[in-house]
Image: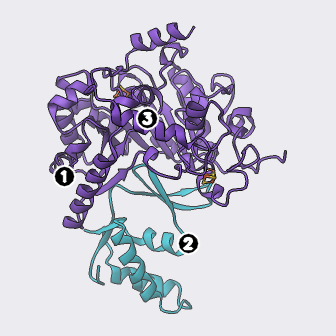
């Protein structure tokens, strides 16, 4: 994944809000991962049309006070793609 | 005795829709006493169970059995599950599946179909399931599942008669385009326990299968994920069964009996029925679900063991089946004074050489015969 990559959620995963867990989760065959706030914020931007660069620009504008948000986002994308939560379009 | 802490919600709901099944696998984990189960739940009952469990926080839903496809209301239940926000998994032998049904289930909102195989070879498959046509049909259905866009999870139950073909099994799964493969050694509950001497692989067989699996993983780092489950008899610590009794797993049997684990029916407890009790009460207040929550019910060596928070003393059903006392440590544990029972079972299985001819097949008639011989 680099800045021009357009990620989308792996179609075998579903992201949704779980009231009982009080967080967003990713559901997949026979499993579930709970997402923390930043992970769900970033994954929420993954829509199969915006590139990693677009997402960085969007979130940097919305959260100007967060230091090195670009680094965090790129790191998360790398982890998420290694875990096959997301894939390039 | 202190009150057990309020449990977290049941994340997993297993809906065992029916004990009916066209196959007769001798390693089936259904209870040997299945012929004594009451009438199957009605569609209305299942809809209520789904709503109540979802409201409590269940997110993963498994439809299993028996063979869940024999229920004609499956599509309707799947549609309700989707609408409620469950991630729903269908666990099937593939028998009874058609291309049309694969698509209808997809349409209804099913997320995932897991097809179970007996073996990579037609002959062994036929011997084990009691059906010749099943194998070719499964292959066709695995392809249909894949092409309908479902994640493909294939499950192979391993035992003495097929574990040496683990390489062919992996190749078959890979050729079918599986995303995940479970090479799950038989768990010795239900019919599998009855047939333990016929099914238990030797230590060498397991080591060989693990070597082959690891070699394949190394050669295909980007390939499908393989889960290899060792039979716990060969381990020195028990598995943390269901993450602890009544912690995250809720099974509802075909006749409505609510269970903290799908084998629990064999235990000497009064389990509630969803016909008379709502899921919230079942989960939080029923005696059976509270019976082995927390650590107060434990005896030594578990009670003072530093590992109890990791494995919760193992499986209650296995402790009861092997020692006769469900509050004992799971005898798989080498700290248990009853470990000799597991070792004796391994020795017996390793000396037992009938080549599968003494296997008891899972049929309703066999279940009735067993019940008759017990009374
Ligand atoms: S294990 Fe075999 S016999 Fe048992 S329910 Fe599954 S397919 Fe049927
Ligand atoms: S003694 Fe009990 S708690 Fe300790 S490791 Fe063995 S089974 Fe687990």
Q: Which residue is mark 3?
A: B63
Q: Chain of mark 3?
A: B
Q: Which residue is mark 1?
A: B174
Q: Which quadrant, please, contains the N terminus of chain B?
A: top right
- Distance from label 3 to label 2 (Cα)? 32 Å
Q: Are marks 1 and 3 on the same chain?
A: yes
Name the quadrant containing residue B285.
Answer: top right
Q: Which residue is mark 2?
A: A37
- Chain B color in figure: purple
Name the quadrant containing residue B118.
Answer: top left
Asked if disc 1 and disc 2 are in contact, CB closer than 8 Å, the reply is: no
Label 2 neighbourhood size at 10 Å, few (<14), some (14-19), many (20+)? few
Q: Chain of mark 1?
A: B
- Distance from label 1 to label 2 (Cα)? 37 Å
Q: Earlier in the sequence, mark 1 or mark 3?
A: 3
Which percent across, then down, holds residue A31?
Answer: 45, 53
């Amino acid at each position: 994944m680099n800045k021009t990559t357009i990620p989308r959620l792996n179609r075998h995963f579903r992201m949704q809000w779980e009231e009982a867990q009080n967080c967003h989760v990713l559901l997949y065959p026979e499993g579930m991962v709970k997402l923390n706030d930043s992970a769900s914020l970033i994954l929420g931007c993954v829509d199969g049309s915006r590139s990693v660069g677009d997402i960085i620009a969007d979130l940097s504008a919305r959260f100007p006070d967060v230091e090195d948000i670009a680094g965090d986002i790129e790191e998360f994308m790398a982890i998420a793609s290694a875990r096959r939560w997301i894939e390039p379009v | 005795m202190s009150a057990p802490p309020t449990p977290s919600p049941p994340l997993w709901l297993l809906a065992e829709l029916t004990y009916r099944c066209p196959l007769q696998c001798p390693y089936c984990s259904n209870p040997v006493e299945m012929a004594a189960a009451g009438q199957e739940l009605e569609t209305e009952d299942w809809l209520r169970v789904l709503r109540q469990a979802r409201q409590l926080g269940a997110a993963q839903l498994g439809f299993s059995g028996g063979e869940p496809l024999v229920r004609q209301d499956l599509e309707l239940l799947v549609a309700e599950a989707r609408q409620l926000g469950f991630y729903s998994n269908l666990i099937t032998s593939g028998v009874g599946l058609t291309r049309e049904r694969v698509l209808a289930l997809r349409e209804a909102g099913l997320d995932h179909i897991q097809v179970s195989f007996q073996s990579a070879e037609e002959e062994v498959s036929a011997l084990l399931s009691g059906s010749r046509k099943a194998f070719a049909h499964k292959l066709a259905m695995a392809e249909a599942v894949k092409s309908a866009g479902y994640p493909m999870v294939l499950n192979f139950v391993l035992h003495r008669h097929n574990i040496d073909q683990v390489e062919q099994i992996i190749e078959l799964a890979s050729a079918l385009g599986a995303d995940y493969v479970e090479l799950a050694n038989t768990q010795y509950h239900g019919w599998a326990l009855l047939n333990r001497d016929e099914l238990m692989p030797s230590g060498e067989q397991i080591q060989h299968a693990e070597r082959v699996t690891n070699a394949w993983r190394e050669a295909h780092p980007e390939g499908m994920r393989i889960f290899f489950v060792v039979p716990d008899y060969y381990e020195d610590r028990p598995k943390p069964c269901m993450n602890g009794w009544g912690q995250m797993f809720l099974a509802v049997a075909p006749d409505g009996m609510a269970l903290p684990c799908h084998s629990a029916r064999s235990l000497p407890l009064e389990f509630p029925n969803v016909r008379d009790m709502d899921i919230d009460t079942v989960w939080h207040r029923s005696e059976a679900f509270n019976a082995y929550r927390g650590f107060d019910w434990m005896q030594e060596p578990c009670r003072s063991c530093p590992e109890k928070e990791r494995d919760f003393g193992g499986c209650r059903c296995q402790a009861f089946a092997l020692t006769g006392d469900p509050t004992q440590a799971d005898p798989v544990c080498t700290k248990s004074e009853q470990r000799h029972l597991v070792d004796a079972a391994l020795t017996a299985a390793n000396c037992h050489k009938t080549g599968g001819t003494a296997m008891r097949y899972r049929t309703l008639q066999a279940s009735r015969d067993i019940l008759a011989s017990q009374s």
